[in-house]
Amino acid sequence: MAEKTKGITRRKFVVRTLLGGTGLIIGTTYLLRNPLRRKFNAFIDTGDVPYIGETDEPALWFEVTPENGIILSSPKVEMGQGIFTGLAQIAAGELDVDVQQIRVIHAPTASGNVDDFGTGGSTTIRSLWPVLRSLSATLREMLKAEAARKLGLPVSELTTEAGRVWAGDRSLSYGEIVEGVQDWASPDTPPLREVGSYPFIGRPVPRNDLADKVFGAAIFGMDATLPDMLYGAVARPSHIGARLKSADTSRAASMAGVVRICREADFVGVVATSRMAAENAKNAIEVDWDADTGWQTRDIEEMIRVGNGTPYVIQKQGNAERAFETAPGEIIRAEFKTPIGAHAQLEPNGALAWVEEDQATVILSTQVPGYTQEQVARRLDLKKEQVNLIPTFLGGGFGRRLNTSHAVEAAVMSRAVGKPVKCYFNRQEEFQNDEFRPPSHMVVHAKLSDKGGISAFEFNTSSGAVMHSFGPLPGMMRNLVGSDFGAWRGGLIQYGLIPDFKSVSWFVELPFATATWRGLGLLTNTFAIESFLDELARKAGRDPVGFRLMHIRDDAAGERLKNVIRAAAEKAGYRDEVVGGTAMGLAASTDAGSPAAHVAEVSIRDGEIRVEKVTCAFDPGLVINPDLVRAQCEGNIIMGMSAALYEEMHVEDGELLPVIYGPYRMAQMKDGPREIEVVLLQGDDAPGAVGEPPMGPIAAAIANAVTRLTGKRPRQLPIRLS
């Protein structure tokens, strides 16, 4: 199908107007910036980010094959969440094809189908839901129009079914219709069908990438190859904040297999005929780093203490300060801490690049193809359109693939040798040069009324950069929003019936790179707030389920939150007592508009905390594929449990440690719960966020259970008994 050139789409216009208009309004009403920032924070917290890209040209998305298959090019990347299957299920409903007829692939940037937002924030299905339905319906009408021409009949006499256009007993397959057609007319989008008529929505369709992944046919970044490919390795520092001063490459240049030493202002690398040769030569480079070796963990912990850095009031209701001064009752105060966390994804970062005279091809695992394309083009002094970024499957993303400067390194080395160069981190380099989940410090205050409810509440959270280090986020937006909404994610108070409350985010610049980690600040902030809610319930002499319910508004969002709390408690048979050496803990959170509640059943065996079972109630709105949503809940629970009980980086003499699996302890199969039970609710008629919201409650749920077992409240992660 030939592309048409169109002007700016309405959806793009809405997005750009929203962003530009927000800046204009906030910029011209500077004195009102704090109330407006809080309103903007509330909007950001919904996570309702629309698709930002071409949306009105089916030819950018679909290819109909002669065999009557359909290839759907996705601008979002598949990093294990199952989106390729979900997208096929959505498209099949409007295209009138079996879901198995649709093959989903990653869209290279050369196709023009680029999402400027990238993949993250649990946005994929919900942002593409309206777009993909419209595009699929439009493509169906395009095929009908062409079939009408070939059959010599009016379109009104044609119907579609099972990948064919029918006129009574006569029919043409979609593959037959597209044969020989060069120019296509794109009609207006027809009315969309009722969601209830979509045959594959709400069904547990098997994953369409499963067989390829099981049998090794799926291509991840590390699998990519090109003819005459060489291998690169870059000398990387072991100390935080290190800057390259000088490098003696004389010994490395003479080693076997070395093709070239690449010396740039910001890195020094080796290109060789094998990966081993490149690694050996890199290790032979004598690099002089300008590094501060004095940093220790205690220095970092002191930096991020609440009270340091810049405070931003991100949420406010009533007057918490006055309530703390005048309301009766004692002020209850608690502090919580969480450590530095690594991504520790299975596939380390790297890229395969081939730079020719006026064009470049880069193949890698990335969550932001468009941004990576721009980075490479800028460094090579090429136009963006001269760089084709080809995304692959991701061997773990979790936010680590949002910053991909290693693509630039591979491209620079390829240009130097005139051949494709594949360059990847080794495991130690991946740990040392991660962009870590920042440590955090949280302080919570509250007062209880004489009726046993919360009369005043204040939450303070301090952390390093999360979204503020995300390259595509415009600097103007950072200045306008002020606070780092990645760091405070999960830090807005969801208990709206508290008369007076305030939430404050403190931002601190740390000396090492920190960025997004699955759920951003959701796990850590929810750990503090929901642990404290449990503590307040005990002080008030109330059960933790009813105590939460009595503080939640009766609006639509509040009802959804109450429903997941009730469902989790009922399904788990929640009890507040220790029975048979096992205790239960409950916690809940709402992230990006999707509420979740967990009940963790915990015991202590052989001196270790054991999570025996987790019951999860989750409301993501309309469920496209219940099996995939349950799998995401299970994955979030295991990953969050791992962070809650085991994972921790520390700083020693300026180095971030440990640097390998094992010493960096993570949950293994033997540590997993014997059962994870997931209850799915539908509180909205459209798909909501799935990939991260179930992460929120798990650490707090475990901590609340441990409190019942030991009588001591865990105040920091990872939770330890001593």
Image (cartoon, grey):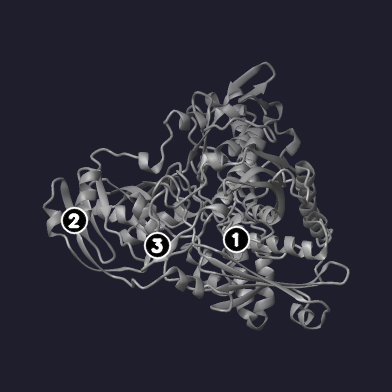
Q: Callout 2: 10 Å neighbours few (<14), some, many (20+)?
A: some
Residue 524 disc label: 1
Residue 235 tag number: none
Q: Name the residue type under label 1.
A: Thr
Name which quarter of the figure residue 671 lies in.
top right
- In this rendering, is residue 475 above or below 185? below
Q: Which of 439 and 400 is in front in this view?
A: 439
Q: Where is residue 673 in the image (x, y as percent from the top left)?
A: 61, 41
- Of residues 106 and 713, which is closer to you in this image? 713
Q: How far apart are marks 2 and 3 (CA)?
A: 23 Å
Q: Which mark is residue 656?
A: 3
Residue type indicated by callout 2 = Ala
Residue, far front: 606
Q: What residue type is labelled 3?
A: Leu
**Marked residue nearer the N-terminal end (2 or 3):** 2
Q: Which residue is label 2 attached to?
A: 284
